Amino acid sequence: MLLFGASITFLVIRAGPLDPVSAILGPQGDPQAYNAIRDQLGLDQPLWQQYIDYMVNMFTLNLGESWVLQPDTSVYSLVVSYAPRTIWLGFWAVLIAIFVGIPLGFYAGLNPNTFSDYIASFGGIVWRAMPNFWLAVILMSVLSQSEKFFFGFNWEGFLYATNVTGPPPLGDLTSVDGFLKALKKIAPAALVLGSASMGNEMRIGRTAVLETVNSNFIETARAKGVPPRSLVWKHIFRNALIPLVPIITGEAFILLGGSVLVESVFDISGIGYLFFQAIKNGDMPLVGSLMFIFILLVVLINIMQDFLYTIIDPRVGYDGGA
Amino acid sequence: MAQKETSAVRSEEEPLLSVDNLQTAFFTDKEVIRAVDGVNFDIHRGETVGIVGESGSGKSVTARSIMGLVDSPGRVLSGSSITFRGEELTEKSEKQYRSLRGSDIAMVFQDPLTSLNPVYTVGNQIKEALRLHQDLRGAAATEEAINLLEAVGIPDASRRVKEYPHEFSGGMRQRAVIAMALACDPELLICDEPTTALDVTIQAQILELLQDLQEERDLAIMFITHDMGVIAEISDRVNVMYAGEIVESAPVEELFENPRHPYTQGLLQSIPGNQPDADRLSTIEGDVPTPNEPAGYCRFEPRCPKAFEDCTRVHPASVEVNDEADDHTAACLLYPEDASQAEAVELHEQLESEREVSER
Ligand SMILES: Nc1ncnc2c1ncn2[C@@H]1O[C@H](COP(=O)(O)OP(=O)(O)OP(=O)(O)O)[C@@H](O)[C@H]1O
Ligand code: SF4
Ligand SMILES: [Mg+2]
């Protein structure tokens, strides 16, 4: 899987339209310099040689140096400086989706066809249907002028003075202050990024609960005299979580893609933003390495999904994970 | 089933469960479905009462009404009465009902493959019942669960308690479900088609198991099925249900020898083997109607080969089929058979005017 992904990446980068040499030289570079740089970067070697080099480097985690974006900086140090912001963003986006979406969905599923169910379901659909960039823009403009909309409540001055956009200050997460500050900073972006997942998880959660409630073993449990509280917590929730596992992990992938956009809008210089820039500038090692990291993440998420399955559902063996 | 009770003995002692004019309706947006419409029957200790009828005749709803498990939009209508050991159940609060469920009245459902929660071990689910009703926990509960599994014939029970439902075969699962139902020593066991989903050999084993358990524990069993063969094997007494009503009720041998209601006759004729000359099985034409209004006619009339004019106008009440037969009733205008037809119809009309029909 890892091997396959890396190979595809190699193909796409090398065979694709990326031309790092012209990017370094600019549009008016003369052919001689072009060839010299080409030589220097090793692009004149046969393709299979490049491929072997690339693969070996990747798997020994020798990520190389950036060619265009920040020449002579190692990719490794770039990733280290950009990644935490993205991780922070993704972490909260997933968390918001899980802790708002699933409870709302479960609540709606337990009280089907009531007023609150309709509100939640309808809200979920609308929320889900809003495109990320649109939501981002709206949220940004509302929050930066929050006094006008919320009767004097000022988001930017709330708790800590911050701008709505810009990278979160991650220097000091161990103190309560620093933590809250970073959290507040990331909240709008995480909300936007997590919004689609939130709506999704709510909908699926609702259906899952409804299905579980109507299943035979719930009736058997009721016939056994199980009180409603333990019926819900013990018998319904755990079963309703099963169909949510692939949804949550599946959304983690979408978040990877979504983060490119959200990071640009909110001006958070994270991995997504870096990736975007790297592609634009034909920075081959950077693109290759980032792709490789994404693939690593995908594999990790898959392993986590199998792990979650084995915890929740005894029918799934660790090897048999779907 | 094993001990043949005479009707004299039967009427002497107080019944364990007595259902009187049970009416359960579902109030849907479109219509009110009177799924159970004026059902009466008794179950005595140690007795097996069978309930047969085609799909949709209201058997499961009857069972759920007794368990107090009828969900919205359904409701047991006022005027219905269910007494268990002399206590009225329909007036119980949900909490009082819950302490009864699983401990005094237990239920086994149709599909053993889905009756157990897939994410907990079999032992866990048996122990849950023990904890709820007998306050047994820990090692004592585990031991009791193992005993129960052994009692229902599961080999290697001490290992099996720790396994999940998917590691059990269908027959084993139904045994486990029965073990769970018996965990708190109930007096009445309601079985809703417990063998329908199993193949024939396993079906026979489960029936045998139920018979053994009944003898051991003096259990009363209400056995729901649409299989006449199973009914013949297991019950002492049979109630035949059609469109929410009990149309015939008799001891099992009497019913099979002398079926009186045209519907019962049709059901018995449709058993393979009962009609050696026919090339084709005679089944009853048509479907069970959905009872969506109080009946002022016979609900079987459209399918009845013996229907006559009055059947569309008078709702038949349950009457003794004739003077000699005691304990054999049918709800059909042809009976009592020793009366003339006009007299019989008049009797039904009069009985009907006394019947209490609830709309709410
Ligand atoms: N939750 C419900 N909402 C509306 N109608 C219902 C509901 N449950 C049962 N009914 C109706 O009650 C009637 C009797 O259903 P019931 O399940 O008791 O039939 P049954 O005799 O058990 O049939 P089967 O042999 O298929 O189990 C049916 O017409 C059905 O449409
Ligand atoms: S009352 Fe009439 S229609 Fe109904 S079963 Fe008897 S004969 Fe048939
Ligand atoms: Mg049924």
Image (cartoon, grey):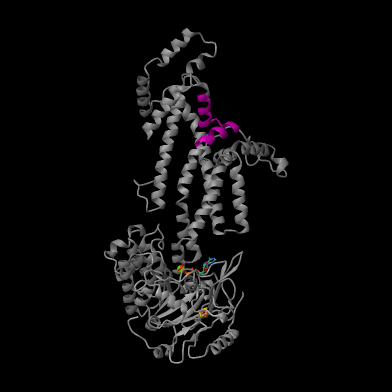
Say if A157 sits above or below B284 in the image: above
Residue B103 appears in the figure: no
Report the residue at 45% width, 30% height from top.
A291
Q: Residue furthest left?
A: B156
Which is more toward the observer, B16 or A73? B16
Say if A112 sits above or below A35 in the image: below
x, y percent for residue B306: 49, 79
In the image, residue B17 lies in the stretch drawn in magenta:
no
Which is more toward the observer, A170 or A233? A233
In-image side of A165 versus B209 (left or right): right
In the image, residue A268 lies in the stretch drawn in magenta:
yes
Residue B28 appears in the figure: yes
In-image side of B64 versus B30 (left or right): left
- The total number of labels drawn is 0
Residue B147: quadrant of the picture? bottom left
Say if A116 sits above or below A320 in the image: below
Say if B169 sits above or below B150 in the image: above
Residue B16: quadrant of the picture? bottom left
Which is more toward the observer, B212 or B31? B31
Q: Which residues are magenta?
A: A256-279
x, y percent for residue B358: 60, 77
x, y percent for residue B170: 34, 62
In-image side of B154 versus B128 (left or right): left
Which is more toward the observer, B260 or B13? B260
> Most prominent secondary structure in the magenta stretch?
helix
x, y percent for residue A49: 35, 20
On-image quarter of the N terminus of chain A: top left
